[in-house]
Image: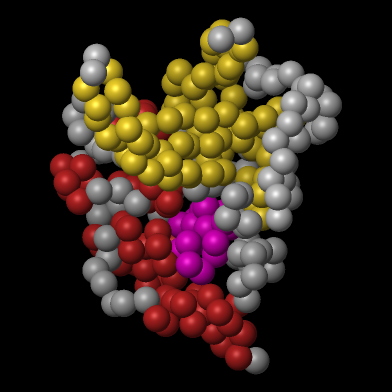
Amino acid sequence: MSLIAKDTGKDFIPAPAGLHAARLVELVDLGEQRKEYLGKITTQHRIRFVFQIQERMPENGLAYTVSAWHNLTLAEKSTLRPFLESWLGRRLTETETAEGIDLETLLDRTAYIQLIHTERKGAVYADITNIMPLPADVPFHFPEYVRMSGEVVQDELVRERGSHSNGDTSRTSERAGTTARQRSERVREMPSRGTKLKDVQQLGTTLYGRQWPAARARILGELGLEDRIESFDEEKLETVLERLQVEADEMEERAAA
């Protein structure tokens, strides 16, 4: 198939400036990129965070998206480290900076982002100047988004405090091309590991895909735990992991029925 590039004649319309509720819809690995400055060539591993905001473009009704670019490093003077700390609302631990953070666990995570308009080369762009956690009691409503991976994000994702406490998982969606049976098989194939936060997040994402944030809120509510899983100790993480394993077994039984 040919790829044809042409001038569409359309002007770029930036997202509105101001404070917006947003969610992370893409995490793009840009790979190693070469940069030359004052005759010196350096190589940096770059990534791009793509956020969707609730406001829609007037011409087509699609949601605006905005991006933030960072080097893939948590060094003390990096831009990624304060970006994540501001988003999570806490300092990264020494363990996190040493062992690393699985950034894919942040997909679908919500945030407040501050946008300002900046003019570059005759065009106006919306730049993310600040990011912070979105309070749990603030409802959000996002239009459909299709990731580059082909995974379709739920048409209208709505979350309000307490709305997931009824235990109803009938609306849990499948990742594109993935059945309940296939997901349960992937869970069985996962190696048995410790109860670190990364293990809980990985199992939750494997079970629920893009619905994991909503399922996590429901599970924590049913267990009587606060919705700040990042601060849980090993005992609380063990409790959540056990609950997830029970739900994995239930999914497997339903798939086999």
110 up-or-down from 217: above or below? above
Q: Height in image: 109 above or below 184?
A: above
Does the segment drawn in magenta span residue 220? yes
Farthest right residue in view:
59
Residue found farthest to the bottom: 257
Is residue 228 visible from the viewing direction of this image? no
Question: Left or right: 187 with respect to 3?
Answer: left
Which of these two is toward me, 165 or 99? Answer: 99
- Please state which of residues 150 and 15 is positioned toward the viewer in this rendering: 150
Which residue sits at x=69%, y=68%? Answer: 170
Q: Which residues are magenta?
A: 204-222
Q: Is residue 228 left or right of residue 251?
A: left
Residue at image coords 58%, 55%:
149
Quarter of the rendering occupied by the C terminus: bottom right
- Residue at 66% x, 55% y is 152
Res. 159 visible in picture:
yes
Main SS of residues in magenta: helix
Quadrant assignment, res 138? top right
Question: How many numbered discs, if any?
Answer: 0
Residue 177, horizontal then vertical, whole percent: 64, 70
Relative image position of residue 20 (x, y in whole percent): 59, 24
Find residue 44 and report its horizontal and vertical position in percent. Answer: 29, 35
Residue 65 position, x and y percent, is: 62, 32
Residue 148 in the image: above or below residue 35:
below
Q: Quadrant of the N terminus?
A: bottom right
Q: Describe residue 4's horizontal placement relative to residue 194 as left or right.
A: right
Q: Compared with residue 181, is residue 126 higher up or lower down, i.e. above or below?
A: above
Give the residue displayed 30% in from the left and 52% down from the top: 232
